[in-house]
């Protein structure tokens, strides 16, 4: 069993499969079932996945996986528990998960309650100084607390932090681009520097960092950062093997709204060509995917966060659901992108 304080880089887990579930040889930890209770080793229904669906690969041992979950994925208590179970299972399997969370629906709800405007441009929230106070309060004080609590229901693993802490995320003000023109969207920042030492120290201590995408600027101003772009920047700085983006659609649609066919795989070059045709919350998400694979992240999975245990399936199985974005020189995988129409997708901005 992985214990707190154990160095993640040397963790090894031997996995064996039984007809009824997943067992890790020599691991006294018991897999959690879909209801959040411990299952006996080898019993049916460990984390709700058949054993054949969960290849606990030695290849991923000690690797860092950054997982971004949107606020829409966290509104449903059952999905929040499922997500927390997945993160703990990754940790128990010897990976180093780092969580970056959004909170779009929760922020919009609080702004409505306070009679403050809710508006988006190019998938980015227009953030006034008053709205920034709400963003900070809701992300770090509400959404993060609920998520950390869900993970820590399985043990003292998760530690919440903001991008402001230890100067982890530094941002500068950015506009949105609408029809080729810059639009002022207030206190919205783009990441210009990542200092990952605080996150690395938590990982070295056997913890699971849970990061809210609020950043400080060199000017001392606090900025609202899109969670997808924050997760991408953090994944690059940590040298992550994988980045997982959870959304509220099945993946990147090939021809939205005429078709709901999902593009299963595409390269960075193909994504760059299609990026101008994207709309809504999918635009910053795929921008973050492109930045990540162009800067050293091995691959990015865009998955439907409404599907229970989407993270485990996306990271640990070969038949990944959703859309996988690969570096241009990625070996042994063929991209499958519709050549004629730039893909579009509608999703809830986080």
Image (cartoon, rainbow, N blue to C red):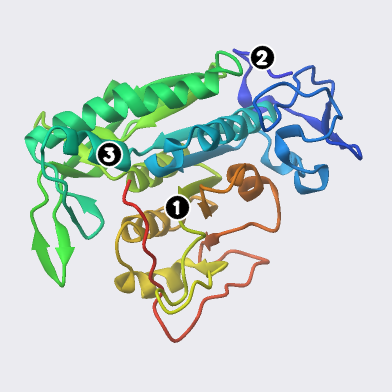
Q: Is residue 270 above or below residue 58?
A: below
Question: Looking at the rendering, which quadrant does residue 195 occupy?
Answer: top left
Q: Is residue 341 left or right of residue 267?
A: left
Disc 1 or 2, which lies upstream in sequence? Answer: 2
Observer-side mark, 1 or 2, equals 1
Is residue 216 something that shows in the picture?
A: no
In the image: residue 155, left or right of residue 146: right
Disc marking residue 193: 3
The residue where tag 2 is placed is: 3
- Numbered disc 2: secondary structure: loop
Q: Is residue 339 above or below residue 5?
A: below
Does the rendering let one see residue 113? yes
Label 3: state its secondary structure: strand
Q: Most extreme residue toward the right, as rendered?
A: 19
Residue occupying the point 61% across, 27% down: 88
10 relative to 164 in the view: left or right: right
Q: Tell me the distance, in whole angstroms, between the alpha carbons under discs 3 and 2.
A: 32 Å
Q: In front of the other: label 1 or label 3?
A: 1
Residue 17 drawn at (x, y percent): 87, 38
**Residue matched to label 1:** 248
Please tell me which residue is depicted at 8% across the width and 54% down the height of the picture.
184
Specify few, some or many for label 3: CA neighbours under 10 Å numbering under 14, 14-19, or 20 or more.
Answer: some
Q: Residue at x 55, y 13 (%)?
A: 156
CA–CA distance in space, label 1 to label 2:
34 Å
Q: Residue 191: x and y, percent?
A: 26, 43
In the image, residue 16 lies at what x, y percent?
A: 87, 35
Q: Of label 3 and label 2, which has the lower sequence position?
A: 2
Rendered residue at 66%/14% (across/down): 3
**Closer to viewer: mark 3 or mark 2:** 2
Quarter in which the C terminus is drawn: top left
**Residue 336 percent across, percent down from the top left:** 57, 75
- Secondary structure under tag 1 reads loop
């Amino acid at each position: 069993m992985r214990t707190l304080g154990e160095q993640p880089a040397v963790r090894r887990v031997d996995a064996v499969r039984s007809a009824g579930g997943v067992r890790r040889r020599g691991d006294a930890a018991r897999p959690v079932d879909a209801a959040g209770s411990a299952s006996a080793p080898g019993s049916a229904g460990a984390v709700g996945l058949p054993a054949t669906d969960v290849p606990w690969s030695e290849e991923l041992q000690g690797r860092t996986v950054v997982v971004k979950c949107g606020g829409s994925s966290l509104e449903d208590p059952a999905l929040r528990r499922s997500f927390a179970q997945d993160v703990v299972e990754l940790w128990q399997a010897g990976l180093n998960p780092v969580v970056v969370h959004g909170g779009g629906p929760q922020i919009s709800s609080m702004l409505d309650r306070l009679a403050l405007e809710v508006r988006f441009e190019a998938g980015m929230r227009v953030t006034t100084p008053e709205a920034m106070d709400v963003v900070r309060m809701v992300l770090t004080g509400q959404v993060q607390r609920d998520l950390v609590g869900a993970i820590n229901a399985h043990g003292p693993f998760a530690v919440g932090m903001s991008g402001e802490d230890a100067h982890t995320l530094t941002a500068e003000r950015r506009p949105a681009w609408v029809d080729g023109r810059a639009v002022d969207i207030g206190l919205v920042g783009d990441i210009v520097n990542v200092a990952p030492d605080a996150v690395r120290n938590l990982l070295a201590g056997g913890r699971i960092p849970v990061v809210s995408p609020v950043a400080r600027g060199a000017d001392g101003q606090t900025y609202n950062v899109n969670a997808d772009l924050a997760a991408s920047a953090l994944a690059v700085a940590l040298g992550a093997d994988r980045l997982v983006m959870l959304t509220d659609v099945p993946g990147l649609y090939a021809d939205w709204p005429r078709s709901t066919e999902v593009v299963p795989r595409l390269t960075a070059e193909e994504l760059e060509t299609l990026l101008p045709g994207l709309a809504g919350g999918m635009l910053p998400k795929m921008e973050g995917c492109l930045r990540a694979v162009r800067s050293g992240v091995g691959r990015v999975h865009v998955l439907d966060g409404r599907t229970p245990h989407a993270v485990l399936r996306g990271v640990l199985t070969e038949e990944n659901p959703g859309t996988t974005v690969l570096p241009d020189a990625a070996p042994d995988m063929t991209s499958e992108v519709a050549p004629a129409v730039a893909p579009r997708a509608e999703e809830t901005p986080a």
